[in-house]
Amino acid sequence: MTHKLHSVNRKWFGIVIGFLLVMMLMVGSVVYGLTSITWATAWRAFTQFDGSNAHIIIIENRVPRALIGAAVGASLAVAGALMQAITRNPLASPSILGVNAGASFVIVIAVTFFSVSSLTTFSWLAFLGAAFASILVYVLGSLGREGLTPMKLTLAGAAMAAMFSSLTQGMLVLNEKALEDVLFWLAGSIEGRSLAMLYSVLPYIGVGLIGALLISTKINTLVIGEDVAKGLGQRTLLVKAGAALFIVFLAGGSVAVAGPIGFIGIVVPHVARFFTGPDYRWVIPYSAILGAILLLSADIAARYVILPLEAPVGVLTAVIGTPFFIYIARREFKQL
């Protein structure tokens, strides 16, 4: 009993430390970048705003960027944790449902055929595309006598992601203007995004995060085994449907704001389970905090990689995530 209490206390301590680190990184995101800003200037921008260039950059660019980075990082990580749970696939991430590919496909259609160029419009179109692709994959994965199974869901997601990606690339090859308009968005970035874009999807992200916490106990039962869960009276189809809906809200909202940022949904849940074990009551909040930490850190680093330009943060997360992905893939292959 005492050991269990100490374990819980350590986990709460980890959440507090992680939260403080997120706050520090958000402050660092406001201060550090191409435009040199001192800590004193950042403080005065909130207490004595004078309309100077530095203050405008802080309030209109850096603060929204920090908030969006934290929200998107947390959302993608939690979506990845849920995805790995319901598919029982350690390499699963939001992209397995075709979220990124579906969002990109709809954006490119809008640019190619309707000359859409507004980032705010992009966000709504991306959300709709992500939701449509996820629902389509879920329906395809449910066909057949066995109903929805992890293998069928994974295969359906991979097939739809490949189809959407191929169609997107085909349209971009035929339309150079569309390529120029959406290239930076397709690379994944939180630079230049406004708080209005975050506000438009914040209710969905909020529902997704809260919902993930509420079903975490049921997810614990589900990952033991579907037969065991059914034997305990759990409505496994309902749990999977709820998790899939929260994944759409979280990943779709994130892609709508920041574009298709990869690898956070794969990497972070594994790191969270390293600290917490397999209990999803702790994996979910740890994933949210670690996801925010990873994306904020990558975004700050992206500002210095190719000075005086900025690299899209999606490039940095890919650099970080690819070696980890290979390690997980090799480990799972050896266990077969």
Image (spheres, rainbow, N blue to C red):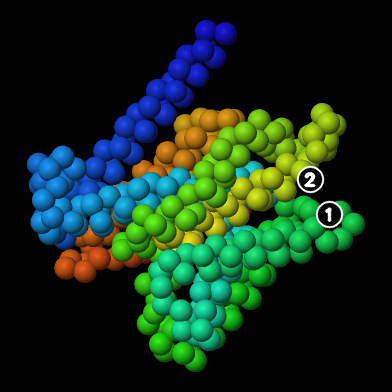
Residue 313 shown left or right of residue 6 in the figure: left
Q: Residue furthest top?
A: 2
Q: Residue furthest right?
A: 145
**Residue 78 in view:** no
Question: Which is more foreground, mark 2 or mark 1?
Answer: 2
Task: Choose between 168 and 195: the one closer to the eye.
Answer: 195
Residue of label 2: 237
For label 1, count other residues whose C-alpha is less than 10 Å away and answer few (under 14), some (14-19) or many (20+).
few
Image quadrant holding the N terminus, namely top right
**Badge number at residue 295:** none
As drawn, 124 above or below 327:
below
**Picture quarter containing residue 209?**
top right
**Residue 150 in view:** yes
Q: What is the three-letter code of the residue carrying label 1?
A: Gly
As drawn, 132 above or below 324:
below
Q: Answer with mark 2 or mark 1, whichever residue precedes in sequence.
A: 1
Q: Where residue 102 appears, x then y in whole percent?
A: 58, 69
Residue at image point 42% right, 54% down: 198
Whether the residues at callouts 2 and 1 have beta carbons within 8 Å, the answer is: yes
Q: Secondary structure at mark 1?
A: loop
Q: Where residue 76 appears, x then y in whole percent?
A: 49, 51
Q: Where residue 308 appears, x then y in whole percent?
A: 16, 68
Residue at image point 11% right, 51% down: 50
Residue of label 1: 147
Residue 97 shown left or right of residue 310 in the figure: right
Q: Residue furthest bottom?
A: 174
As drawn, 237 above or below 299:
above
Q: Where residue 260 appears, x then y in whole percent?
A: 47, 64
Residue at image point 52% right, 79% down: 110
